Amino acid sequence: MSLLIRDARVVSPGIDLPLTSIWIQGDRIARIGPATDLPQEPHQIDAAGHIVVPGFIDIHTHGALGVSAMDGTEEAIRALAAAKLREGVTQLLPTTWTETPEALQRALRGIAAYRENPVFARVPGAHVEGPYLNPKCVGAQNPKFVRLPDIAEIDRLRALAPVRIVSVAVEMAGAIEFVRQLRTRDIVASLAHTAATYEEFLDAKQAGLTHLTHFSNQMTPLHHRAIGIVGAGLLDDDVLVEVISDGIHLCPEMLRLVGKLIPPERLMLITDSISASGQPDGESIEGGQRVLVRDGICRLESGNLAGSTLRFDRALAIFHKTTGIPLAKLIAATSWNQAKSLKLEGFGKITPGYYADLVILNAETLAPVTTLVGGRVVWTLD
């Protein structure tokens, strides 16, 4: 099937084209240009000046609309993949909590089952957050299930479904060798829930570490005599940084600082959403712990933040408004950087030959209007 998206503002890494049209053949982008220069297909979408961007890739999401990656069923992952479409997300990594080996295996089986028939957003694999964390920096992760890094456990999980990212505290015993082993398996190592020093960060980077999980949250803070992991994220030229752009996990001034000091090519917007996302305020159980949601903010009874109710499109809108970074630069932080890091070829840009995973955004609010996966309209605003 062919499709023509007419008269859009096309924004992709490094380009911002007004009144441009996109010709899609099958599941790929065929050509881009003025509508008068493209075949007049019977199937058309009039973008009416709205913005078309590459479909978002959320590499850190625990759940939404009442379902969790830890539910361990195909139905839960299907519901999560469907829910994310309304945020403009066309690919996601369902993200686990620190739990028992059996619970993690159930979660991976649910992911594997959905991957057999991925009718909504794509799921290239899992993000395993923990259980290899510093017990002094667990945040909202369950301290009962924290354990030392174990590559054999990861191998058991990846035998069930692809493991694309593992978040780990690199100062724990055996963690540097664990990072090396992840690299040999083509799994991204991300530093998380950590009290590591800058020197330990450098050791881990040499071993293969490439990401920082939910930047500034549950990681060694910046100090003028020891810059810690927050300082590493600001200083290092290579490491990619996850950002929860909700104004809560990072206050507006910190978002501005991040936008000023870290170039867009090192940023990755995430939601860190939990099952309460898209739901009314109330209570939920996440990773075996009670989470209270008030005014859309998720906390344990202890007061620790426990994920978010953030939508991906809102993450983009908030970061864009707060920092003033032009969309043509910032848009890389929504998909292109993630696609490069995870080696997802053919995703993250609007260019001929790439997959037609696209989202049409309201030109004023950046809220999704239509989401396409592989050239198919899979969600549209009522």
Image (tube, rainbow, N blue to C red):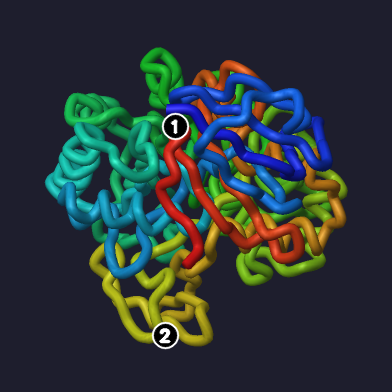
Q: Tell which of 292 and 273 is nearer to you.
A: 273
Q: Residue at x 75, y 51 (%)?
A: 49
Q: Residue at x 42, y 72 (%)?
A: 278
Crowd class of label 2 (few under 14; some 14 to 19; many from 20; radius 10 Å): some
For label 1, the SS is loop
Name the residue that disc number 1 marks: 374
Crowd class of label 1 (few under 14; some 14 to 19; many from 20; radius 10 Å): many
Q: Nearer the viewer, mark 2 or mark 1?
A: 1
Image quarter (top left, top right, bottom left or bottom right) of the N terminus: top left
Name the residue that disc number 2 marks: 281
Quadrant for residue 323, please give it: bottom right
> Mark 2: which amino acid?
Asp
For label 2, the SS is loop
Q: Residue at x 21, y 46 (%)?
A: 107
Query: Are the residues at dot 2 and dot 1 in contact (C-beta closer than 8 Å)?
Result: no
Q: Tell which of 117 and 40 is nearer to you.
A: 40
The percent position of residue 94, horizontal first and vertical second, equals: 35, 46
Q: Earlier in the sequence, mark 2 or mark 1?
A: 2
Q: Residue at x 46, y 75 (%)?
A: 298
The percent position of residue 39, horizontal first and vertical second, equals: 63, 24
> Mark 1: which amino acid?
Gly
Q: Is residue 296 above or below residue 18?
A: below
